[in-house]
Amino acid sequence: MSRIVPSQVVDIIDQIFPAAKYQKSFSVTSVHQHELAAIVSLIDQIPSELLMLDPNDYIAFQVAATTIKNTIPI
């Protein structure tokens, strides 16, 4: 298994959701559930030592990842 780094996840998000880079908000629907699942899977593979965020950004990051996980149908 290859090592996933944060910049790779950002690149994938930019490819799948180009509006994310330029717009503060945009719509994501159930049509995107597979892409969201892939993004969450990649996020889960990032080694913790590479997540060098200040405490508030880390909390926001975790809330966002958990929100995505909880909105993807099982």
Image (cartoon, grey):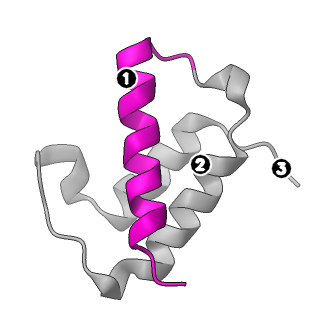
Give x and y (percent) for residue 19.
19, 57
**Which label sits on residue 43?**
2
Judge from the rendering whether residue 2 lies leftward or rightward of residue 12; answer left or right.
Answer: right
Q: Secondary structure at mark 3?
A: loop
Q: Residue at x 43, y 14 (%)?
A: 55
Q: Residues within 10 Å of mark 2 (few under 14, many from 20)?
A: some
Question: How far, Cα to Cα, is label 3 from label 2?
Answer: 13 Å
In this rendering, is residue 74 above or below 37? below
Judge from the rendering whether residue 48 lies leftward or rightward of residue 12; answer left or right.
Answer: right
Q: Secondary structure at mark 1?
A: helix
Residue at mark 1: 57
**Which label sits on residue 2?**
3
Judge from the rendering whether residue 49 lies leftward or rightward of residue 34; answer left or right.
Answer: right
Residue most extreme to the top = 54
Which region shows up in magenta? 52-74
Closer to the camera, 22 or 72?
A: 72
The three-letter amino acid code for the residue at tag 1 is Asp
Q: Residues within 10 Å of mark 3 (few under 14, many from 20)?
A: few
Q: Tell me the quadrant of the picture where the C terminus can be found.
A: bottom right
